[in-house]
Image (spheres, grey):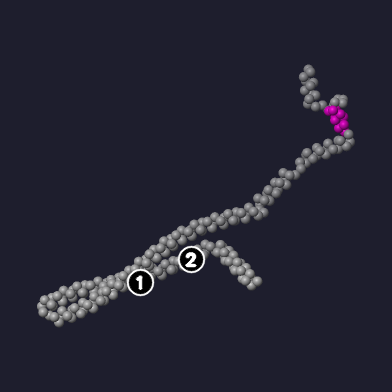
Amino acid sequence: MISMMKTLFAGANSRAEDRLKDTFALELIDQKIRETEVQLKAAKATLASLMQRQRGEQRQFDGLQTRIATLTERAKDALNNDRQDLANEAANAIATMENEATLRSETLNRLEQQTLRLRTSVEAAHRRIIDLKQGAISAKAIKREQNIQSNLRTTIGRTSSADEAEDLIARVVGKDDPFEQSEILSEINASLDHSNLEDRMAAAGFGDTTKTTAADVLARLSQK
């Protein structure tokens, strides 16, 4: 029972969360884009720091290489001039600088790899933000269209002035014709008091008609 209640509560919370997301979708999209931009800004700052360190290490490495080359030439000159003491001292210094250059070279390689990976990530995040902003523009346009359609359906679906006008037209059109109704009443009354009996019998061929008709006038005219 408890497990079932937990499942029901979880389902209700999930549906409520979905409704909130649908209602505030555009606001959530903008917020997530802002969060992504903050993350991208931090990544750019880290990349700039790495590049700055890489350039510093490169300058130190280049300086060491220059000093090693210069000191090597001096050591050769000292050897050629029988200054073994200076040549030995230069050799020790060159060995120390070469070891330092090796360490700096390894550091440069690591920094280069880190910089390359981070630069790739930054570029991908930048492109993604552009896509997200374009998607947000499309989402806002679609949302506006959906709101317009929803408002239109709401307006058309509920009782409105148009509905009232249709009802009034139906009432007017559906009313009985008072003139026709009067004629029918006259016919009913005539049949009840037999006032039209002679005309009905004349129409059936029994005797002359009591009223002159257009047909009678035309018949007389044709005989003259």
Residue 143, picture quadrant? bottom right
Residue indicated by mark 1: 49
Q: Circle 1 sits in a helix, a strand or a loop, which is it?
A: helix
* Residue in view at x 21 percent, y 72 percent: 66
Quadrant location of residue 62? bottom left
Q: Residue at x 11, y 79 (%)?
A: 82
Magenta-tinted stretch: 195-204
Residue flagged by tag 2: what amino acid is it? Lys
Helix, strand or loop: magenta stretch: helix
On whether residue 198 falls in the magenta region, the answer is: yes
Give yes or no for residue 37 being in the magenta stretch.
no
| Depth check, front residue: 172 or 137 | 137
Camera-side residue of 12 and 42: 12
> Toward the viewer: 56 or 169?
56
Q: Which residue is mark 2?
A: 32
Image height of 186 relative to 68, above or below: above
